[in-house]
Image (cartoon, grey):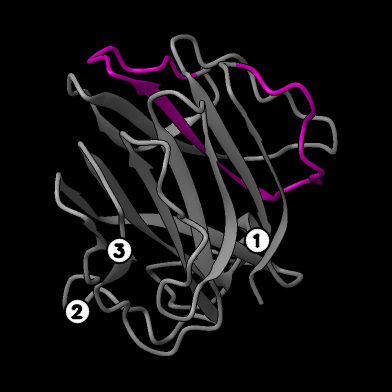
């Protein structure tokens, strides 16, 4: 089963305290640069899930698999805010993050779009969703429930922007659109990511395409 091990947030480009993690955990970073079309940089060992460069704020969501209990999470130059989450699965399983959709708007209805049809992995051991969002306002309450998700964090600089994260595991159907009602907003963005837990296939378990038998 997918579990949220730990998370950290910081107003800046470098974490002051690293989240708890161990070998082969999934780490996901949300790096946000407010009111700028300049993307936060990505350290070399990370893989992008989603990037967006717009004048109201640039966002980079990236992931990696940790190789120890003392991994570095690097500096994400130009980031005004960092969110780092750590995820673990059952023994012998690996969690794959999959980007599905982004929503944008300037209304007071901040919504995470529905998961596209045909993309729910019903054969997985576990399926979860991670909701990440940014909002160019500081007066809204972002901790309210969205669907059946659990609130992870909401944080802002107190001047210009807010960010938010929520999640749910153990899903049996695709995510349907849901969101928050804002008091005010000048520009918001939401990103939907699914977390899929499946069996980890090792090199000794690769199927031989000629004999159709397992190589051991």
Image check: 60 left or right of 63? Answer: left
Callout 2 secondary element: loop
Residue 181, numbered label: 3
Residue 204, numbered label: 1
Please, is residue 14 above or below residue 195 in the view?
A: above
Give the crowd class for mark 1: few <14, some 14-19, many >=20 residues within 10 Å: few
Name the residue: 33% across, 64% down: 180
Magenta run includes residue 144:
no
| Label 1, label 3: how far apart the Cα atoms are | 51 Å
Q: Nearer the viewer, residue 50 or 58?
A: 58
Q: Nearer the viewer, residue 38 or 180?
A: 180
Residue 187 rendering spot, x and y as whole percentages: 21, 38
| Label 3, label 2: how far apart the Cα atoms are | 28 Å
**First in sequence: mark 3 or mark 2?**
2
Residue 57 rendering spot, x and y as whole percentages: 28, 25
**First in sequence: mark 1 or mark 2?**
2
Q: Which residues are magenta?
A: 14-42
Which image quadrant: the N terminus? bottom right
Dominant secondary structure, magenta: loop
Name the residue: 40% across, 78% down: 147
Residue 41 rendering spot, x and y as whole percentages: 43, 14
Please name the residue that numbered disc 2 is placed on: 118
- Quadrant in the rendering for residue 106: top left
**First in sequence: mark 1 or mark 3?**
3
């Amino acid at each position: 089963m997918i579990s949220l091990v730990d998370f950290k947030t910081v107003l800046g480009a470098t974490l002051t305290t690293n989240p708890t993690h161990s070998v082969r955990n999934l780490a996901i970073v949300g790096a946000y640069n407010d009111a700028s079309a300049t993307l936060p940089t990505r350290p070399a060992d990370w893989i992008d899930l989603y990037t967006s460069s717009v004048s109201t704020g640039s966002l980079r969501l990236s992931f990696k698999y940790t190789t120890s209990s003392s991994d570095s999470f690097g500096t994400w130059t130009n980031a005004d805010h960092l969110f780092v989450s750590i995820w673990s699965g059952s023994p012998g399983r690996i969690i794959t993050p999959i980007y599905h959709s982004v929503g944008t708007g300037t209304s007071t209805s901040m919504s995470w779009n529905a998961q596209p049809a045909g993309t729910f992995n019903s054969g997985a051991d576990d399926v979860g969703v991670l909701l990440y969002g940014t909002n160019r306002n500081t007066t809204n309450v972002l901790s309210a429930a969205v669907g059946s998700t659990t609130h992870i964090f909401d944080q802002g600089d107190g001047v210009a922007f807010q960010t938010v994260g929520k999640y749910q595991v153990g899903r049996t159907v695709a995510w349907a659109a849901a969101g928050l009602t804002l008091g005010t907003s000048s520009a918001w963005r939401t990103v939907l990511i699914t977390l899929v837990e499946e069996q980890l296939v090792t090199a000794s378990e690769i199927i031989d395409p000629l004999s159709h038998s397992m190589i051991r």
